[in-house]
Amino acid sequence: MSRPLTVCLAGVNAPGYRSLACAYLLSAVRGDGRLGDVGTTSFDVDTRTDAWWIAYRVIGLAPDVLAMPVMCWTARTVYEVARIVAAELPETRIVLGGPEAGPLAAGILDAQPAIDAVVVGEGELAFCDLLDAYRRGAQNSIPGVVRRRGSEVIEGHPREAIAELDALPSPYDRTDIPVDGSAFIETYRGCPHRCAYCYEGKGSTRIRSFGWERIAADIQTVAGTPGMRSFSFIDPVFNLTRERLGRLADLLEPHARRGVRLHTIEVDIEAVDDEQAALLVRAGVASVETGPQTIGAAALEACGRRFDPDRFSAGVAACRRAGISVECDLIIGLPGDTIDDVTRSLEFVVALDPGVVQSSTLHVLPGTRLWDRAEESGLRFDPEPPHELISTRDIGYRDLRRLEALGASTSIAYRARLGNGEGCR
Amino acid sequence: MLQFADIAIGAHGVVSCEVCGLGSGAAAHDLEVVRRSLEDVRVAHPALRNVSFEGFEPFSHAELPSLVEAATRAGFERIRLTTDAGALGLGGNAGGCLAAGVRHVRFVLLGSTAESHDRICGRPGLFESALCGVSALRSAATDVGARVCISALVPVCRHNVEDCPATVARACSLGASAVELEVSGSAATFVELLEAALDTATSNGIGAVVRGWSSAPRVYRDRFERVDR
């Protein structure tokens, strides 16, 4: 017999970022005809909020189901929240999902007794099926879900990626859209690249796009939010094709003219020329984010990345001519990189004068090729999230820390200059 | 961290070890000399946008505002002052140098405490004044929303090498975002102390560079060719 369920979706985010996960799940649940009697509530916090206070909010709601997306940055906080909630509300079912949890589902259920189920991959359909099973008291296996059934753990068949994205209710329809720059729009899923350290493509280069009518509606909803000054796109390559970029520019231009700006838009910088830069400006793009991550040949090959320094430089220059700031990212500790490769990469991006130079240490993420091949690649990393690199075959622990500090200091020194966005922290 | 062209604004005028006796006969260069140096760098190194005023305490230079203006007019985007920071907290100096266009300040630290720093440089009270100066600069930058880079230069000689790790720790506690060690003479033989000083910076998450120590760990060596006028 089914009974009404109450569901709490708690989004624990990295500071300055609000994941779309809870919004998508909330819309999916509310749009699922089977779940009409399910009560839902959702809130987002970031990791600066102590886990005990996140648990405080959840326990006050006393939901039947607590769902939390998990990323490597937020995992420790999420697991702590789960432990506290499970201790106080042992009847509450705790469900996790997201890029940190999905690839490690069975292991998480083994190691974390507080967790009842993990959704693997895209959550919208699988989570609704799970809630339907909960409300019916059904114990069946569910595609895309690894769940407890008594003392055993049952793994549902892998679920195919959602083919018709437009069938998913928009995450923006009934969501409080932040106007502080932390709102993101998604126009497609997948990634054309297969960088070994990244989980974005989920192992496939297949791109699934929302339809243009949906994209236009989402842009209108987000960009048209009263008080909206800045937001971004989650798409891993905003300039996927010239045609697509042009269509996005057409949709965004009316909002850009009103002063709405897009920040840290991820682009394939080697494809950017003056024409693409002009389209980015029309779209209201104030800043883009790109690699090269490294210029070391061995690391590029190990990570499956291509890099043409001339095209990269030309793309940065085109953006700068158009008044767009470029954040050049570097990853310290990629397999194959030596100390010299890291320092030369830093010098390369500083010499480009892109606008922002940012470096970070490699985190070996579950579900990525580097995770699967860590031993053969000579990577030693912390098995606990966020899976930070300890050392590589070429760079020892101490030198990695020294390089991290060097990268951080270089970023600060680089940004301290006349006229660099002063007054606009 | 970044490459700067060193522009001499004087000679023998930077705070240094009194016992080593390098700081006598200080003399400031006049504005025209500095202008020519800036132009020489601009022509010889057109891609280099960073200059550092060296050789003389900038806040003792009568034409400091004009020097900074000359650098900005020459198109340089990062202008650094190497200073004892003693005058940085006086009057409107901190706000004034920001308004003029300075975004990089490198304060010289010779010891970890008032006793050691002031004794080495022979200037009682300088340490406390420098602390006030660094704090004043940080406040002024916050007030106007300017991004500044405050770093520390630690000259290391045989008279202060034993205090070197603690001096770096002090620099880190003052909020330096980078530390540079300039090692001279026999101080280079104190390998463990120098490495401890550099690792003190690293363990505080701060980049460190060393000059004058040929067997320094690779990551810490200054990679940039010296550009000076």
Image (cartoon, rainbow, N blue to C red):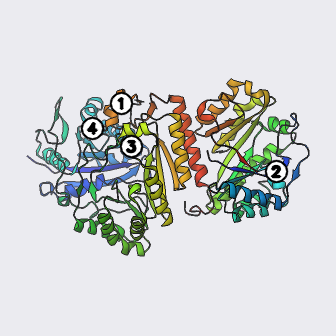
**Above or below, comparing residue A280 to residue A46 in the picture:** below
Q: Do the residues at pointers 4 and 2 share their chain?
A: no
Which residue carries the number 2 mark? B57
First of labels 3, 1 by sequence position: 3
Residue in the foreground of this view, choosing between B93 and A46: B93
- Mark 1 to mark 2: distance in Å? 53 Å
Q: Mark 4, mark 3: which one is toward the viewer?
A: 4
Q: Nearer the viewer, mark 3 or mark 1?
A: 1
Q: Position of residue B212 (x, y in %)?
A: 72, 33
Q: Is residue A221 visible?
A: no
Where residue A103 is drawn, which disc sits there?
4
Kindly state the secondary structure of the residue where label 4 is placed: helix
Residue sticking out furthest to the left: A1
Q: Residues within 10 Å of mark 3 (few under 14, many from 20)?
A: some
Label 2, residues with CA under 10 Å away: few <14, some 14-19, many ≥20: many
| Distance Cα–Cα, label 2 vs label 3 | 48 Å
- Mark pair 3, 1: CA separation: 22 Å
In the displayed orientation, state which residue is furthest to the front.
B44
Say which residue label 3 marks: A74
Q: Which residue is mark 1?
A: A374
A117 relative to A137 in the view: left or right: right
Rendering quarter of residue B191: top right
* Circle 4/circle 2 CB separation < 8 Å: no
Q: Residue furthest right?
A: B25
Residue situated in front as seen by the camera: A298 or B125: A298
CA gap, disc 4 to disc 2? 59 Å
Give, as a three-letter code, the residue at label 1.
Answer: Ala
